[in-house]
Each structure stands twice: as C-alpha cells, then as structure tokens.
Image: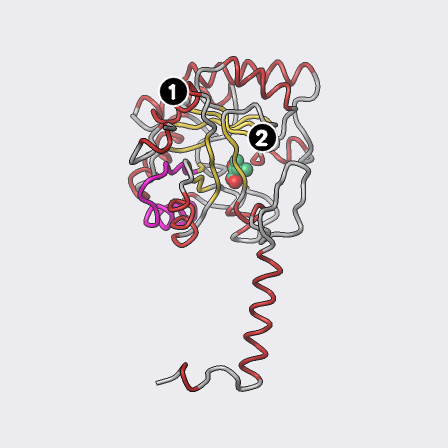
Amino acid sequence: MSVNKEIKKVTTNTLQKMKAAGEKISMITAYDFSFAKIFDTAGIDIILVGDSASNVMAGHETTLPITLDQMIYHAQSVVRGISRCLVVVDMPFGSYQSNSEVALASAIKIMKETGGHSVKLEGGEEAVDSVKKIVSAGIPVMGHLGLTPQSIYKFGTYTVRAKEIDEASKLKKDALLLQDAGAFAIVLEKIPAELAKEVSESLHIPTIGIGAGGHCDGQVLVMHDMLGINIEFKPRFLRQYLNLHEQIEGAVKQYITDVKSKDFPNESEQY
Ligand code: KIV
C-alpha cells in the first residue's frame, strides 16, 4: 500500500514519508475552485496556487505584477474545491523580499485569509531569514531554486540555470540552507538533471522538479501547459496530456454554429 493511498489528508509529514519510501510526489498548479476540485478528486498530492496565475490567468508577461490580494483570491477559490491534497500558496513578488517581518506578515495574511496549508517563496541564502521567521510562526514553507521567475530581469532569460559550476555550487549550498531553515520541500526549476539528482540525494526533505529531470522526489507542471490550454509554451520538459485549446475552440465553434442556425436550443432544451 502506498503512503499516498493510506492517508485521508496530505500533510507536509506525508511528503517526508513519501520521500523516505521512494514514492514520487505529484503536484500541479490550480487557480480556481472547479479545476482544484477535479485535481483533488483525481488524487493529486499537492496543488500549488502558483504566481504563474499572473501569466496564465491574468495574461501578464511575467509573474511580477500579481498582488498579494489577487493571490489570496485564487487561493481561497482553490481551497473551497479540495478536501484531501496539500495546498501551497505562492508568495508574490514584493510580499517577502524587503525583510523577514514583511515576509511573516504576508505569510500570516495568506494563511488567515485563504485556509491554505503552506506558502512558497523563491530564493536561497537571501530568503533564509524569512523562511526561519515564517516557519517559527508555525507556517510550513516550500523553497524554490534554479529558475526563479520573480528574478527574470536579473537573469534576462528563461533558459536552464546552474549549468556552470559556480551557480551549481551555490544552488547546492542554498538547498541545504533552506532545509536547515526549516523548509519542508524545495521546487527545483529548469536545472540539469544530474544537479537535481545530487541535490535531491543530499536532502532529507523532498525536491519537486519542473524541467529538472526524473530524480527529483516529485514533479510539478502548470495546469495550462500540461492540459494544452496554453499552446504557445512548448519547452522540452513539458509533457502535454491533452489539447484542450483545440477541443474547447472546436466546441465553442460548434456552439456558435448551433446558435446561428437556430439548432440550439431545440424542443427538449427549453421549458
Ligand atoms: O508559479 C508557478 O506555477 C510555479 C511553478 C512553475 C513551480 O512556481
């Protein structure tokens, strides 16, 4: 019997047990009630209310514009749709970078107003004080290393991170620092698979990869990418499970045709 199937609610503790048992962790993003309900019913371990909402929900080019209140709105909707999975809420750009007091206040606001179970923030050494402060208030924190989209203007591109030895060494150090600060898991985004393997093996907390290879303890994908809603984004790491863009467009075209031709509604579709 898998750890996942034995439990009624996924907690941070469950994730540690899954790592120890070698059982992979599944995570997906969601931003609203209806999708969260489907993903939870399907048996997903973690829903991430990602700040990727800024891109896929609001249409911004980067994750920077989304606000704390907008993240809270998305998280509240997700929490209403789930009964079993763990909900992680991204702390948006500007809600934690200034200092650890600000970070704690933002994390408390998220937990109080959403009913989510944990928060995620980006960064290594520079985020450690905030992670410690938030964890000491009893709020579980997920870290995020590698490609950290809130720093896009520092990186300049969305290409693979930590290919060079200096950046790879910093990432390994940062992962250990986050673990020591009390993070319960770390997202590794777009880094070489070998590096992700080394980091995952060096930690007792789980790593969740996106574009970081198969040796991470779990995987995460953005729902719009894996369901084929957003078809412009096709990185090598993405496995697209559906082509919802095509299916939805086809359905809406058919609906328009049916309305225009007076086929809809028919006798049985009216009172
Ligand atoms: O915001 C997000 O969707 C994320 C994932 C890409 C990990 O942080």
Magenta stretch, residue numbers: 70-89
Quadrant of the image for the N terminus?
Answer: top left
The residue type indicated by label 2 comes to: Glu
Give the answer, above or below, for where 123 lies relative to 266.
above
Quadrant of the image for the C terminus?
Answer: bottom left
Disc on res. 207: none
* Residue in the image at 64% along x and 52% along y: 231
Give the foreground label among 1 and 2. Answer: 2
**In the image, the residue with mark 2 has its CB under 8 Å from the nearest atom of ligand 1:** yes
What secondary structure is found at the residue carrying circle 1?
Answer: helix
* Residue 256 relative to residue 79: left or right: right
* Residue 52 relative to residue 84: left or right: right
Give the answer, above or below, for where 255 lies relative to 87.
below
Q: Position of residue 165 (x, y in %)?
A: 69, 14
Label 2 Cα neighbours within 10 Å, binned few <14 / some 14-19 / many ≥20: many
Between marks 1 and 2, how big is the CA–CA gap? 22 Å
